[in-house]
Image: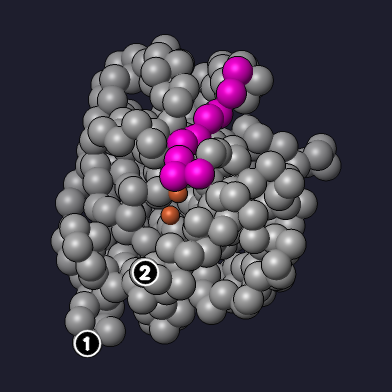
Amino acid sequence: MAAFTLAHLSDPHLAPLSRPRLSELAGKRALGYLNWTRNRYKYHRREVLDVLVSDLHAQMPDQIAVTGDLVNFALESEFPLAQAWLRTVGPPDQVTAIPGNHDAYVRSTRLRFAESFAEYFGGDGDGPAIFPSLRRRGPLALISLSSAVPSAPFMATGRVGSAQLAALEVLLQSLANEQLFRVLLVHHPLRSANRMKRLTDAPELIALLARHGVELILHGHDHVHSTVWIDGPDRKIPVVGVPSASSIAHGHYPAAAYNVFAVARDGNHWRCDMTVRGVNDALRVREIRQLRLF
Ligand SMILES: [Fe+2]
Ligand SMILES: [Fe+2]
């Protein structure tokens, strides 16, 4: 049986940014905008994102996951730009997108992502698009969580919340007897050394996953390559993060990259091979490494 492929990219932080209205520039946004105009605009580049996505399309993955931070300050003007970009990535039945902290950013826009991208994360069936959502694609069960909550200035924390955790537990119980490769999508990493950027209820989520398990967890937020393993009920679960899809290399941040996971059934087990492809200094995308996760 041919492997089913899932490509994962994250944190495009779409540029260019139109000038915010003065009324939009208060508190956290004013600080964020200052940081963007001084620093971040230099590192998040549309031309980098474009070569990465066109290379991704050339790999012809069966599905694509985008794990948040599509925009920067959740300004009204950023959402149409992000919608247009996501349509170039693919149609909603092939692309699943979840929000990051930058897509919520401040209280007044905390629901804008869900309003703008419902068709890109809504579950199968006719019900309302809410988190957690479930999409069945080939052998995959794509399970989306939202950890995007507004946070105080200088903070980039996330929270899944007790309602989503309870619903996730019910969802995983309902899938327990099916032979599915369960992929959990969440913007924030489950382990973070930085208190200002952490998922505040990660311990509860990790405990839930130790009880019910999934096969793979994908996240963004840290803008670095990362693979850690957490406990599942029968074996360890890989938690894989990718760099920002629009970033040039700077400081300890690597240049933009994405991962492709090839999933196949092998007897009584799943096989999952991961290929990392990234942008080099000449703005070309090449394979960085390949490894078997299990
Ligand atoms: Fe980000
Ligand atoms: Fe983030």
**Main secondary structure of the magenta stretch:** loop
Query: Residue at the spot x=64%, y=60% of the render?
Result: 25
Q: Residues within 10 Å of mark 2 (few under 14, many from 20)?
A: few
| CA–CA distance in space, label 1 to label 2 | 22 Å
- Classify residue 206 by image quadrant: top left
Across and down, in percent, residue 265 comes to 36, 40
Q: Nearer the viewer, residue 111 or 237?
A: 111
Across and down, in percent, residue 157 comes to 46, 36
- Can residue 211 be seen by looking at this rendering? yes
- As drawn, the label of residue 282 is 1
Query: Residue at the spot x=60%, y=18% of the render?
Result: 162
- As helix, strand or loop, the secondary structure at mark 2 comes to helix
Q: Is residue 121 left or right of residue 230?
A: right
Q: Is residue 275 left or right of residue 38?
A: left
Q: Nearer the viewer, mark 1 or mark 2?
A: 2
Across and down, in percent, residue 23 comes to 74, 62
The amino acid beneath tag 2 is: Asn
Query: Residue at the spot x=70%, y=67% of the render?
Result: 22
Q: Residue 145 colored magenta? A: no
| Dot 1 or dot 2, earlier in sequence | 2
Magenta part of the chain: 153-162
Taking the image as four quarters, which one is ligand 1 found in?
bottom left
